[in-house]
Image: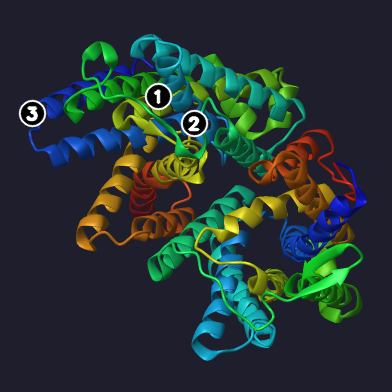
Amino acid sequence: MRRDLPFIVFFTAMMVETIGVLDSGVWINFVAMALFTTLLAQAWNLLGGFGGQFSFGHALFFGCGAYTQAILQLSGGLGAWPALALSVALAAAVGAAVGALSFRYGLRGSYFALASLAFAEVFRIGALSLDITGGGVGLMLPLQEGFSRLQFGSRKGYALVLLAFVAAALVVSSWLRHSRFGAQLQAVRDNEDAARAVGVDPFTVKLRASMMSAAFMGAAGALYLQMFQYIDPAIAFGPAISVEALVGAIVGGMGTLWGPVLGAVVLHLLAEGTRNLFGQLPGLNMVIYGAVLVLIVTFLPRGLAGLGRSALVAFAAWRERRHG
Amino acid sequence: MLEFSILFPSILGGLTTGAVYALIALGLTLIYGVLHIINFAHGAALMVALYAVYLLKSHFGIDPYLALPIVVPGMFALGYALQRGVINRASHGKDENILLVTLGISIVLENLALMAFKSDTRTIETAYTLSTVQIGPAFIALPKLVAFGGALVASTLLLLIVHRTDLGRAIRAVAKEKQGARLMGIDVDHVYAMSFGIGLGCLGAAACFLLPAYYVNPQVGSGFVLVAFTIVVLGGMGSFAGALLGGLLIGVVESLCGLFLGESLGQIGIFAIFIAVLLFRPQGLFGARA
């Protein structure tokens, strides 16, 4: 972790500098949305990448964060910042509940993926039918700029807040790579039975990872609401956010520190690039998302982050052949 | 509230929907039983089949029921090619990879449809769209009744193929013991692709029976895919009888939930069953192992 920290500090400082220097609205928007996607991918990576639990319904936690943020301000009269803290806490609690239910009964692999998808769907239908969530119409946050309201006139403010969470997720990921808990989590991912045999309790380990992952996902949801001042059931609990989170992490490299950052930025560049090239063709960016997912799984099973490592290994093998 | 004259049409409607669900789930359970993968692209493939039926009707005037001999082989070919060309290559022998690849395929298919057809919901008009048949106190739309019968016939055909033909024997052998089947001279990759093709062929049949009383848009598949997963899990993954009974059961549950809880909450009963079965009886009603 001590080895990663300088890089994380450097990355954060660079980003702060970049956001400060940028004056074109298009680029500030690009940076803010790339950081948003990064946060989604990082959150998914905590459970999916380090823990090997493939969630196909991570939008569940995102939606809980977004709706809590909205309801606490609209009906609870709370300030935006206390609401943010509570949204994160509630998302983590939902993460604990879903994790406890799924892992208690030993759901693994495909079964866990299906269960997570179903949970998100139940919440989507629930949000469509309840009064407090505004039904299908959704909830709208009144526009009131100001730091204390967590609403900014320019996307720069949002970009900086998102950056703070991205940096926090980097620190947590780095901790997972080097701590005892992280080692236990990765052991459970690689072979649950073997991990149990050496005294790791898979249930507790996965449950904690689920809570951490859900907390960051909830933060992303709350910040989404602040940024767009609007949420509805399809955005909150629909498949788009779940897919964005898992594709970013997988394309970048699961279980790595910088993979989700890399994956999210590359995918975002790709999406924006195609949007600029081919106009506003609806769906094309998602076609590319899907195709890239298939190609990455086929040719780069360890993601973009694994590409660098494979190159190093290949280079070492080549040198060995030459000299040996 | 529990009067027969209200309950009976609701149950009957549920059974007709359930038969189509069962046909969709049979394709899914065949793919799961043989390849041991969950096909996340199943809903998107159904959407493709529905668009095929729609285009045949709107461009060439081919009746949906007469389109069966075109759409079913077409979907079979698509499935065979997808499994051989994409999924098999990407799997590297890991289940997670297949999960992700089928997810990727479904994203590509859904959004290609969005590009080609926009997000408009489309329906077709046939002479019999609005005809109804009276059964006891219930009036039921003729296309739904045909769908019920057609889905049952197609399911029976599928069961016959699996249990009575050499191909079926090979499929069952590969499902039980892949290595052993390979040693007996069975081309496992071919059987995988055949199973995937037949699974998608079921969707072709389902689409032909579905469209006269239904609609198509790029997202139409996602509504079916979770229902189909539920049926497959409920019936026991890989069990054909389970999928058939599970489909009918889920159709009735959905219909009754819609009756008592209102249309928008109708599907919540399905997901409640889904989560409960996943948690408490993951081997399903007819499944053999946990």
The answer to which quarter of the image holds residue A291 is bottom left
Q: What chain is tagged by disc 2?
A: A
Query: Identity of the amino acid at label 1?
Result: Ala
**Mark earlier in primary sequence (2, 1):** 2
- Asked if B148 appears above or below A38 in the picture, the reply is below
Residue occupied by mark 2: A134
Q: In which quadrant will I find the N terminus of chain B?
A: top right
The amino acid type found where label 2 is placed reads: Gly
Q: Residue at x 78, y 55 (%)?
A: B251
- What secondary structure is marked by label 3? helix
For the residues labelled 3 and 2, the Cα–Cα distance comes to 40 Å
Dot placed on the residue nearer the N-terminal end, 3 or 2? 3
Q: Which residue is mark 1?
A: A222
- CB atoms of marks 3 and 1 within 8 Å: no
**In this orientation, does residue B182 appear?**
no
Does residue A180 appear left or right of residue A138 in this picture? right
